[in-house]
């Protein structure tokens, strides 16, 4: 299914995005990816060393940068079949402490970044009856304490994707949003603190989480099956189920998981 297809994966230099890039190259896709840090892009090019990979510097939260990135991909590969809006950042701070700058940065990358890339890729995707995917989160189904800006950005992403899916129903384009559970990646280390600084460490035991490769395989399978949405990991599915049917109990359980004595523990 992916062989010869032009696939954009935003944020492909780390974690889930990197796993997606590696899997897609193996499947014979023509892959374009981006990130903000040039060293990481050069490292990726070196590691993969395949002419089917185009790795460009772009900050998806910046409309001009995102537009330029999409235009360069179309210029290089001639079209876009699949866009995977994956680039994302997280945060870790109670709302009472957090700077509004942290909240805005998270929204600008996770929500506006996807909007920017989709806006400029849309015509080509419609022409090719392709796919628009967004990597959301369990935090987009259930508000998570200490990550209120992250949850807000993923709820916004899901609502916007659902509306877009409905608008595009008769075009042959599939629109889906995918919600991984905890997955091994750099996302927790790169998360912003209350003062918009990089957290630099993960509060979880990363080795116990789903691997990025496993997550990438499930994402590609959901795209291939033209699913509407997908939720990964047992814990993730359990949280979404519990929140739907027992929301007040889930408030308490979620608080217990993330907060102890009024302080964030995860
Ligand atoms: N890992 C999890 O547990 C988990 C769970 C649920 C959902 N997710 C979602 O999965 C997606 C991927 O996350 P991940 O866990 O793989 O994170 P990650 O390891 O931190 O990777 C994030 C990638 O996005 C890029 N990026 C960040 N900000 C960007 C920007 N403004 N413009 C362009 N690229 C940007 C990063 O490169 P640069 O830093 O160089 O820009 C990096 O390549 C995110 O949307 C995240 O919310 C992750």
Image (cartoon, rainbow, N blue to C red):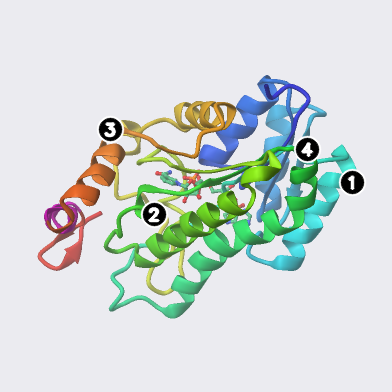
Q: Residue at x 45, y 41 (%)?
A: 185
Q: Is 30 above or below relative to 80?
A: above
Residue name at image x 15 percent, y 51 percent: 246
Q: Nearer the viewer, mark 4 or mark 2?
A: 4
User: Could you tell me how far apart the alpha carbons at marks 4 and 3 are, in whole angstroms?
Assistant: 35 Å
- Mark 1: few/some/many CA within 10 Å (<14, 14-19, 20+): few
Could you say whether the residue bearing mark 4 is in a helix, strand or loop?
Answer: loop
- Look at the image and give the residue range highlighted in magenta: 249-257
Q: Position of residue 247 (x, y in %)?
A: 18, 55
Residue beneath label 4, please?
128
Foreground disc of the pair 1, 4: 4
Between disc 1 and disc 4, whose residue precedes? 1
Q: Which residue is mark 2?
A: 140
Sequence-wise first label, 3 or 1: 1
Q: Tell me the residue that label 3 is attached to.
A: 234
> For mark 3, does the 10 Å Cα neighbourhood hold few (<14), some (14 to 19), or many (20 or more) residues?
few
Dot placed on the residue nearer the N-terminal end, 1 or 2: 1
Image quarter of the N terminus: top right
Q: Is residue 91 visible?
A: no
| Mark carried by residue 75 | 1
Q: Is mark 2 within 8 Å of ligand 1?
A: no
């Amino acid at each position: 299914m992916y062989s010869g297809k032009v696939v954009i994966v935003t944020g492909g230099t780390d974690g889930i995005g990197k796993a997606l890039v590696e899997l897609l190259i193996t499947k014979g896709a023509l892959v374009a990816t981006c990130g903000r840090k040039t060293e990481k892009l050069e490292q990726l090019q070196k590691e993969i060393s395949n002419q089917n990979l185009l790795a460009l510097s772009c900050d998806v939260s910046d409309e001009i940068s995102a537009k330029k990135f999409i235009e360069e991909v179309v210029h290089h590969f001639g079209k876009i079949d699949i866009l995977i809006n994956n680039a994302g950042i997280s945060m870790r701070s109670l709302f009472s402490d957090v700077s509004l700058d942290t909240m805005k940065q998270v929204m600008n990358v996770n929500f506006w970044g996807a909007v920017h890339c989709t806006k400029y890729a849309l015509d080509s995707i419609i022409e090719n009856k392709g796919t628009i995917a967004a990597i959301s989160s369990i935090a987009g189904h259930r508000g998570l304490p200490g990550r209120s800006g992250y949850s807000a950005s993923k709820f916004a992403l899901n609502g916007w994707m659902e509306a877009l899916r409905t608008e595009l129903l008769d075009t042959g384009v599939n629109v889906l949003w995918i919600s991984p559970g905890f997955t091994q990646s750099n996302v927790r280390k790169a998360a912003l603190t209350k003062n918009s600084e990089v957290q630099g460490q993960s509060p979880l035991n990363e080795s116990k989480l789903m691997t990025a490769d496993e997550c990438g395989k499930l994402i590609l399978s959901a795209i291939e099956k033209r699913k509407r949405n997908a939720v990964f990991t047992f814990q993730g599915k359990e949280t979404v189920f519990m929140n739907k049917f027992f929301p007040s109990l889930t408030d308490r359980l979620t608080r217990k998981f993330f907060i102890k004595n009024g302080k964030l523990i995860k």
